[in-house]
Image: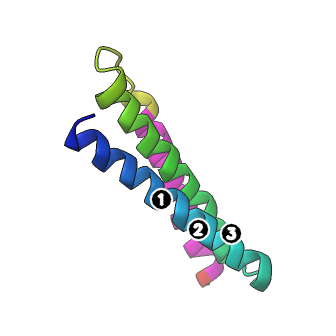
Amino acid sequence: MTIADAIYTLCAGTSLMAAWLLLRHYSSRRSRILLWSCVGFAGLSVNNVLVLLDFGLFPGVDLSILRSLTAAVSLAVLVSGLIWEGA
């Protein structure tokens, strides 16, 4: 395991922890912005796992389209949640 792999793993874990904390807070407050943020961070966690798979474990396989798609969808969820709940 290289330093880059460790950093990718820590990034995925951080995103997953943020999603879990947001979901836990959503269950007590029922604020929809927390739910949108949780879904967005869960998607970013999946994106970070794909980065680890793409660069660390399977360097010969190109997962760039899948990584870009998950990042775009996750950020779209975050932005649309902010727009809908901020208005």
Looking at the image, which is closer to me, 29 or 36? 29
The answer to whether residue 4 is above or below residue 84 is above
Question: Which quadrant would the N terminus be assigned to in this image?
Answer: top left
Question: Which quadrant would the C terminus be assigned to in this image?
Answer: bottom right
Label 1 crowd (10 A; few <14 / some 14-19 / many >=20): many
Amino acid carrying mark 3 in the image: Leu
Is residue 32 something that shows in the picture?
Answer: no
The residue identified by callout 1 is: 15
Secondary structure, mark 2, is: helix
Looking at the image, which is closer to me, 12 or 39? 12
Q: In which quarter of the image is residue 20?
A: bottom right
- The residue at 44%/61% (across/down) is 14
Between marks 2 and 3, how big is the CA–CA gap? 9 Å
Secondary structure, mark 3, is: helix
Is residue 10 something that shows in the picture?
Answer: yes
N-terminal of the pair, mark 3 or mark 1, is 1
The residue identified by callout 3 is: 23
- The residue at 37%/37% (across/down) is 51
The residue identified by callout 2 is: 37
Amino acid carrying mark 2 in the image: Ser
Between marks 1 and 2, how big is the CA–CA gap? 11 Å
Q: In which quarter of the image is residue 49?
A: top left
Amino acid carrying mark 1 in the image: Ser
N-terminal of the pair, mark 1 or mark 2, is 1
Label 3 crowd (10 A; few <14 / some 14-19 / many >=20): many
Mark 2 vs mark 3: give the one in front. Answer: 3
Looking at the image, which is closer to me, 63 or 13? 13
* Residue 25 x %, y %: 68, 79
In the picture provided, is 9 more to the left or to the right than 73?
Answer: left
* Residue 18 x %, y %: 53, 67
Secondary structure, mark 1, is: helix
> What is the span of residues highlighted in magenta in the rendered image?
67-85
